Structures are given as C-alpha cells and as structure tokens.
Image (tube, coloured by chain):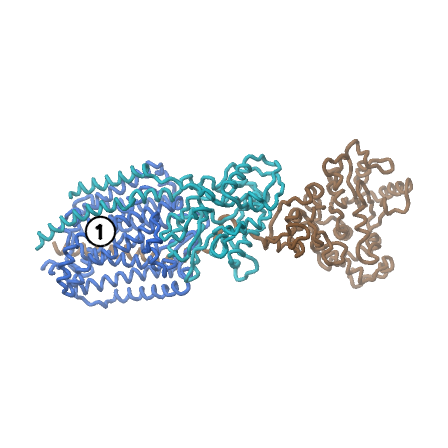
Amino acid sequence: MSEHQALKRPIITLPFLLLAAVALIGLYFLAIRFTSGMGFVTNLNSGYAWGIWVVYDIVVGTALACGGYALAITVYVMNRGEYHPLIRPALLASLLGYALGGLGAFIDMGRWWQFYNIFLPWHMNFNSVMLEVGLCVAAYILVLFIEFSPAFLEKFGANRLLKSLNKVLFAIIALGVLLPTMHQSSLGSMLIAMGYKVHPLWQSLHIQPLLAVLTALIMGFAVVVFEASFTAVGFRRPSETPLLTGLGKGVVGLLSLYLIIRFVELLLRGKLGLIFAGDLGSWMFLLETALFIFPLLVLLSPDRRQRGPYLLYAAVSMLFAGTLYRFNAFLINYDPGPGYSYFPSVSEIMVTAGVVAIEIMAYLFLVKKFPVLHSADPA
Amino acid sequence: MKRRDFLKASLGGTAALLGSGAAEARGNLEPAEDAIGMLFDATLCIGCKACVSKCKEVNGMPPVAMGDETQYDAARDLSPQTLNVIKVYTEGEGLHKDQTVDGFAFEKRSCMHCVDPGCVSVCPVTALRRHPKTGIVTYDADACIGCRTCMVGCPYNVPQFDYRNPFGEIHKCQMCNQAGVERVDKGMITGCAEVCPTGATLFGSRKALLEEARQRMTLTAGELYNYPRGDVRSPDSHHEKAAPSYQQHIWGEREAGGTNVMHVSAIAFDKLGMPPLGERSYASISETVQHTLYSYLALPAVALAGLTFVVRRNTRDDEGGDS
Amino acid sequence: MAVNEFDFTAVEKRLGVSRRTFLKFCTGVAASLGLSSKAGMAMAEAVADPQRRPPVIWLHGQECTGPSESLLRSEQPSLEHLILDLISLDYHQTLDSGAGHQVEAIKKKAMRENKGKYLLVIEGAIPLANDGIFCKIGGETMVDITNEAAEHAAAIVAFGSCASWGGVQSADPNPTGAVGAPQLLSGKTVVTIPGCPPNPANFIGTVLYFVTYGKLPPIDEKGRPKWAYGRLIHENCYRRPHFDAGRFAEEFGDEGHRKGYCLYKLGCKGPETYNNCPSLEFNNVGGGVWPIGVGHPCFGCSEGGVGFSKPLFSLADVKTHTPPNMFPSIDDREGGAGISTGAAAITGAAIGLAVGATAMAAKKLDAKERNEN
C-alpha cells in the first residue's frame, strides 16, 4: 500500500486546459465524421484506405503503449524485480494507449455499428491477420485493466478483492506478455498482404512479425524512460536515472539485434542498393536508421547511460525511429500505384491530436488521484 | 529464466518460424472447378463505354459528376459509384490504336475476381468470400465492419469504400450476381459482356476463356479471326477482324495465383496500369506466416504455459522479497 | 466596293433568281465553310462579276456521272443555273450540247486561251493498266487527257470518290488498275471532294472559295477541304448518344433499329469515315435524308480503304474519340488531396513540440541531476 501514492496536486492546470481545448476541437470533427461520413473529415481515398487514424492511433499508438509490455518481460519474465517501481505508471500509460488505440479503431471503422461481428465466431476469418490483431488488442485492453486495477482497488480500499486478485495476477501477467507479442507481431504481418504496395526496404515478408515485435519492445523501453524523465521534471520528483540506466543497457542489445536482422534481410534479398537510390524511400530509410543508430551509440557508453539527459535523448530518438519505421511501412513508403496520394487533412490530424490530448489528460488525472507513481524516496 | 535463455529461446523461435515457413507453406489457391470469369481483349475495345453505362444500370449507380454538372457520367476511376471503368493509355501523339509509341489503347478496370483473393484472405469478418462454385468474390455488407483491410490487401485497389456516407459500405463488382441481381444464377451473362459491341468483354467459364485467350496468342498480326461476342461458349454473334499483334501474355493466367477476369492486349500490361505482381499470391505468404504462428493456437498455448510458469515463479520471489 | 451599293440587277437577270435567294445562297455556303457573313457578301460579289468566273475544264473518267448528277440535282429552283453560272463551263462531256471533234477542238482552244487560269475538275477514276486503254475519249487515253489538262490548270479538283482515290473500280482485284487523280498527278496539289455521290455543297463551297479568294481552302493530307472533311461522321452523328450509352441495333428491323439506336454493330463505318453528312444531309429536304438518317449504316463511301473495300457489315475501327466521350488516363483517380498548408504546419508543429519538449526536459533533468549529486 505504501509502495505507490497519488500525487495529490491540482487537476486543473494551464496545460490541462490547453489539452482540453485540443480535445474539444477533435470532438467537433468527430461529430462530423459520425454524422456526415469519414470523407468530410479525412483525406482517405481508394488507394490510401488507411490514414493516420489507423497508422498513428493504432499501429504507432499501441507500440508507444508497449511500456507495460516491455517492463512485464523485464520484471516478471527476466525476474528483474528492481524495476518494479516503474511498472505501474507504465501500465497506466499502456492501458490508456491501448484503450485509445481501440477507440481509434472504432472511429476509423466504416461500419462501426457492426463492430461486434469480429467477436462472433461464425463471422471470424481465421486466415485474417486483422482478426488476430482485433481480438488480441481487445483482450489485452482487458488484461491491462486488470493488471492496473490494483491502483483503483487500493484507492477504494477493497483489500479482500485485491488479495484474491493478487493470487491470480500471475496468469494475467503471463497473458499480458503473450498478447502484445502476438498482436504486435501481427501488425507487422499485416504488411505482408499489402505486397508490392509496401516499399521493398520495408517489405520483409516473413520477417515482418519479428521486426514489428522488436520495434515494439524498443519503443516500449523508450517510452518508459521518456515517461519517467518527464514525470521527474514535470512533477519535480526525484529522477529515476539509476533505474533507467539498467534499461538502457538492455536496449543496446535490442537495438543491435533489430539492426542486424534488418540489414541481413536487406542483404539476403539483395535490396541494399535501394538504400542509396536517392528517392523518398532511401532518404526515409537513412533517416530512420540514423534514429535507430543514434541511441545505440549514446547508450553504448556506460558513462552516458548514467546521465538522465542522454537517456532521454536516446529514448526520444528510439520513439521517433520506431514511429518512423511504422509510418514508413504503412504510409510514407506505402504506394498503391501511380495517381494516388494522401496526406492527412487538418481535421483528420485534429481528431488524432484530440485523442492524444484525452490520453494525456486521463494520465494526468489518474496519477494525481490514484496511487500510480511509486512513493518517492523519503527525502 | 536467465536473459541468455530468453534470447536463446526467442532466437530459436525465430529460426523455427523461418524454417517452418518453407515447410508448411500454403501455396496459391487453385481456381474453382467451374469458375466463371471474363476475358477483356484491349485490342477489341473501341471505348464506347457501353459496359460502363450498363454496369451502372444493373447496379443502380448514379453517374459521376464532372464539376457541378452531371451531363454525362464522368467517372475517372473506380469509385463507390463506379464498379467498372474504361481508361485510356496514350503515348506521344496518341494517334494509333494499340501501338506503344505514339499510340493509344483502352483498358478496363473492374474487379479481377482473383483465384486467391487478397481481400478475402485479410477480411476479419468474412464479409468478402470466394464463392466455392463460381469463384466470384462476393461482399456481405451485413458482416462488414468497415475496417477497409480489403482495400489495402487488394493488389488492384478494387474495393471502394463510400467515405462520403456516414453508413457507407464497400462497393465492388460481384459479376452481376449479388442478391437482387443474380444475373448469372438466372442463366444470363454479366451486363458488361452483354452490351459489348465487339466482344472485347467476353463472358464464360475461366477454362473456356483461357482456351480462347491462348488461341488468340497463336494468331499472327493481320490474320483474320472470328471474334465471338457475349458468352464464349454460345456467342450471340461473331465478327471477323484482322488480329492485332498480341503481347504473348494472358494477364490473370498466373499473376498472384491468377484471376477469373483475364486481360489480353497489344501493349505491355505495366503500361496499362497493371501492378507488379509475381506468381505467388501475397495472401498465401501472409497465411503461411499466420498459420505457422497460430496453427490450432499451438504455439501461443505453449508460450502461455511457459510464461505462466515463469511469471508465477518470479512473482512468488517478489512476494517473498517484498513482504 | 460596299455590298449595299452593289448592283445585283444584272445578276438577278442573268441567273433568274431574286437578290434575296442569291445572297442567302452565298452566305449559306460561306457559313458551311466556317466563314463570316462578310465572306458571303464577298462571294456574292465574286459570283456576280462575270469577269471573275473561272473557265472550267471538266473531265470524265471511269465513273457513273454521279457527281455531276448530284450537282445538277441541287435542291432549290434555278440553282442549277447558279451553279453553272458560277463558272464558265467550257468543256463538260455529258453536259455539252455539241459532240465529237468539234467539242474536243473547243476544249483545246479553251485550254490554250486560258493557260494557267482554268479550273480543272476531274470526275471518275483513271485506269493505268495496259497503258490506260480501258478509258479512251477521242482516241486518247484518260491518262494522257488528264496529264495534258493538268499541266496548265490553275487548280485541280477531283470530284467524287472515283477521282479522289479510285472509287468502286479500284476495289480488289482492280483489273483496270484504276487510281484517283492525286495518285496520277503526284506532285501537283489536287483538292479531293470524295463521296459516292459527293455532296454538291462541298463542291460548291470549295469552288466559291476559289473564285472569291483566288486560292484553295485549307486541305488535309488527302487533299480534302478541312471544312467539309475535318470530322468523322461518328463525331457529329445524332445517333452518337446511343453509342455512348451502349444502345445498339442488333439487326435490321429489331426493336433497337426501330428506336433509332446506334448502327455500329450493323457495320456502320461512321467511326472511320471523314465527312459532313450528319450536318448537311442530302438534297436539302430535311428529315434526315442520308444513309444513317434513314436507318442504314454508313458504308464509308468517301473514305479510301473503307468504302468498297471493307465488307458492308463488318465492324468499323473506331478512329478517334472526342467529347463528351472523354477517357480518364490509366493513372487518373477519384478524390485524393494534396498536402494542405495547415496540415503540414500542424505536423511540423507536432514534431517540433516533441523535440522542443525533449530538449527542455533534458536540460532540466541535467540541472536536477547536478543538484542531486
């Protein structure tokens, strides 16, 4: 009980109000989307059926919400209990990220009033990657909620429920590791079916699921560092740098593994030449790779790993790298053929911005009202 | 579990995934035994757009306005209002029909009714199906959730979502056999093939059409050939015409597993806007990966068992340490 | 000379038509040539001036005299006078009242006297096989007659399909080796007015233009005046909307045929035949008097390589497409919008915000760590 505590600070602050304004604008456009149709809000067309609502809200959004997943592996699978203090805020961020990813999917769903068809066995298509993603994400949101529920139970003092939950929590945690592995890999598998539309530098076919899981983990760890750094600065709490240093070391391994697999795939399939083709694809690849290599170089040095700012720079670079990787594969270097073009419209971006604003507002509210952050060392 | 073990296990899993990918690969689907389809001969098309207009009539679709005025149907491409459209290839002066340089050619865009359809493979709710007998790729709006994965998974960008409708749905050619139309079931042929004045769009079984297409491949340029109109097996009529210089390529014979709607032309298909496809369907690769990972949920089940064991052991340690 | 001041009484007397009919005719011809009514007046003046009437030598080769007949059967009363009075018809084998050596002598004299000034009209094909023996007049072959007349002609007009490209007798196997005047007179400019029969209006217009301006109207590579033969029949056909909508007569007398549907499937050659029949029709009686108008497919009488060459009911090759039948190019797509400035600005701002916030947080973190240590 003493492990975590609410921040007990005022909810209504200037940033909160600004976020509320963004959220309201987003809601306004959402109203248009549901009353008139998606075409009046988005720039989607027959070539680009998926825009930022899918690619940012779901594909990138859930990866940014992989902090809980990454820490669950660290703490519960690799048995590094020392990182336990980081886990609850990470779970909250994951819960919010995934919940809003689910909301994003609903917003983007053209025939949303039939969404439940995905849960009806007689409608299911077990060949479909999308089905697997949909079911896994839905299940994982539930799992995250249960994983995070001790925060609510503690707040409301439901101790008995908390005790019985703790008895079965291990099974939920196991699911909480399995499910993201499944659907994050499937987000990669989805690219396979898009075939030639995905630029060869990103169309790794059989390797897609592996690269997707690796980038999800990299982004998961990065987001833990990012969140911890901003919490420390924003709420003027002691920095978590000593803990993050260890994570930084682990990330070096992940980054190296990712880069090796990525380049070996390009080498074996003879696509290395495309890197220097000088077109959009090649520039984007170079930028993306630079964003992956930069944190590797930063974190290789044990000295820098112990410095908060360096960890933060590395983390943000990884977040950009992973985000760009997914944007490249799904949107920027997704080419359905000549004549098609897409760039999100202002209203489309504002809906996404609104969703993100709601996510941050909910995070701020919950950490201030519920025991999420671990108790600060008695200073 | 040590980190080393974990890495080892995950690498092992990866290796298994990659290795088994080849072993259990799902190949391309085979054409339905009695698949029906159409053969579009671009060299016969005169650009009269009778097929476009008949298609709109059969499917009850409005003309596409150009600017503010609707005088003629001005469809530029497939859209929720257009399931079939005639497009033109032009090069240089664009004077000579079916000539690559300084020439022009017509090309039809409509659902190709793939033998191994990407849209069917990716649809989470089985709204798109390949009819077991006819091979027609059908759509069921009552099942559809509007995720539009079919649009992304179609190599020809055929499925069209009606974005400008709050209750929009996917629109695609269903070979005039959707509920309420059922032309094929009634023994009729597709609207576009029925009205085509030159037999550029020819209806028939995939086998018979393939035979016809192969026959055309053997023609030398200028040789007179009796082209059938309507249904390849029982044509309404024929007309004699000198054969063009055909590309030795029947689009849809093998591309990504083949299609039931096939094209022949005197101009290379990449110039006519056909996508860069190999013989293997992306659906088969995607399903191979998916089935390797999720066959009977065996792999996830084993993984879950292992994870549960490890997590239980580790949380116990935690509890012991904490309390 | 201003038109208003022009004295038409002489014309009225000479041609036996009213001033009104005369002017209407001239402006009508000018309009069909795509010229202004001012040009019509200029034509009227040119015609009215007896000094400007060109002498004409009119030759007949292998043919049925269809062109002359169609010219003489122009619709309005007295107009045949007008036509013949436009020109000074010095020699015309079927119209000349005289015959034999006398006429041939007149022809030679006229050609000699009007050297370089006369208009040569050729009607009928010219056989080349066996030294041209298949068509002889006054002991001379048509080849020689044509070459002789063409040498000092001011302008040469081939009237009718036979003279323009060989016509019916040039159809396979072409035993007489019949060719049109342009083929024989290669190197000379020959205006062709093809048609079987040709529309008299196309001839009159061309000649009037020549009389008025002293030069030939713009012609295409086959020598056809562009004002008359610039467009496919298909382009101006009033059955075209049926073609565009895919409504075709399947056989003669069927429902589509009775309803006036497009005759393409019956072998109409409108899509590959250049002529102005849909707008001029024939005989100026209205009511759609021309082949397609009365329900028969165009057979391409004026188009070399189509008329008398292609089977009557074989499908035409559609040559060209004009609005309203526009075609989207292969890469044309519906919808799709580019990057809006606003969207680009917001995207940039979002990335900037993330980077800026990171830099600020890193700075504070740095300060904090320094303090803590």
How far across and how far down the image is residue A317, in percent? 26, 50
Q: Is residue A268 left or right of residue B32?
A: left
The answer, for residue A336, to whether it is visible in the render is no
Q: Which residue is mark 1?
A: A175
Task: Work out whether residue A160 or residue B222 is closer to the camera in this orientation and state it.
Answer: A160
Q: Which chain is blue?
A: A
Task: Work out whether residue A5 or residue A174 is closer to the camera in this orientation and state it.
Answer: A174
Circle 1 SS class? helix
How far across and how far down the image is residue C335, in percent? 46, 56
What hue represents chain C? brown
Task: Work out whether residue A351 or residue C301 is closer to the camera in this orientation and state it.
Answer: C301
- Find the residue positioned furthest to the top: C130
Tell me the quarter of the picture where residue C149 sits: top right
Number of marks: 1
Q: At 27% across and 42% down in the image, what residue appears?
A: A259
Q: Is residue A130 left or right of residue B58?
A: left
Q: At 70% across and 41% down in the image, what residue appears?
A: C309
Chain letter for mark 1 = A
How far across and how far down the image is residue B66, in percent? 53, 58
Say which quadrant the C terminus of chain C sits in.
bottom left
The answer, for residue B28, to whether it is visible in the render is yes
Q: Which chain is cyan?
A: B
Say which quadrant the N terminus of chain C sits in.
bottom right
Q: Is residue C163 left or right of residue A327?
A: right
How far across and how far down the image is residue C294, in percent? 71, 54
Q: At 43% across and 53% down in the image, what residue appears?
A: B139
Tell me the crowding category of disc 1: few under 14, some 14 to 19, or many 20 or more residues within 10 angstroms, Cα based. many
The kind of residue on which mark 1 rests is Leu
